[in-house]
Amino acid sequence: MNFWDKVTGNDMRREVKTFEARAEKLPADYQAAWKEVQANLWSRTDFTGRYLLPILDRVLGLLEESVADGQSAREVLGDDIAGFCSALAGEEGAKSYRDKWREQLNNTIARKLGK
């Protein structure tokens, strides 16, 4: 990977496009589960894109293997995909962007008020 690709994120965009091409080959219920997994994981502030891409790659690999084994998406991920993603994030209360921004706002207000 060259410096320019790393700075601009082109390498990550290519990898995400590869994930999408792989996901399009999955059955419809798996594609819906994949989109929900992505929505839940990308919003975690605990990860940057570079740390999240290997996790997404492994989840997609899990989905591909379970299709080959004849399992349904529900059997693999369970009924609570958000809970599955929280477990992947390492804890139930992993912070979202909203939590991070709220904390920054509270810290700024406290600093302005001299507390």
Image (cartoon, rainbow, N blue to C red):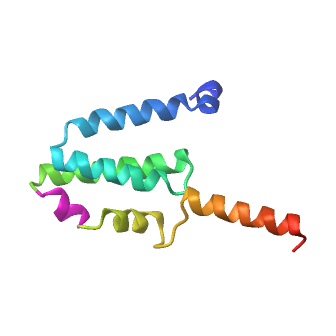
Residue 8 painted magenta: no
- The quarter holding residue 77 reads bottom left
Residue 99, x across and y down, in percent: 59, 63
Q: Is residue 27 above or below residue 108?
A: above
Residue 42, x across and y down, in percent: 47, 50
Q: Give the total number of marks visible in the rendering.
A: 0
In the rendered view, does 71 fall on the left or right side of 49? left
Residue 73 painted magenta: yes
Q: Is residue 25 above or below residue 80?
A: above
- The quarter holding residue 103 reads bottom right
Q: Name the residue at the left extreme.
A: 70
In the foreground, 3 or 16: 16
Residue 45 in view in this figure = no
Q: Residue at x 60, y 32 (%)?
A: 6
Q: Quadrant of the C terminus?
A: bottom right
Q: Is residue 107 above or below residue 20?
A: below
Residue 53, x across and y down, in percent: 46, 46
In the foreground, 59 or 74: 74
Residue 58, x across and y down, in percent: 35, 51
Q: Quadrant of the N terminus?
A: top right
Q: Which residues are magenta?
A: 71-78
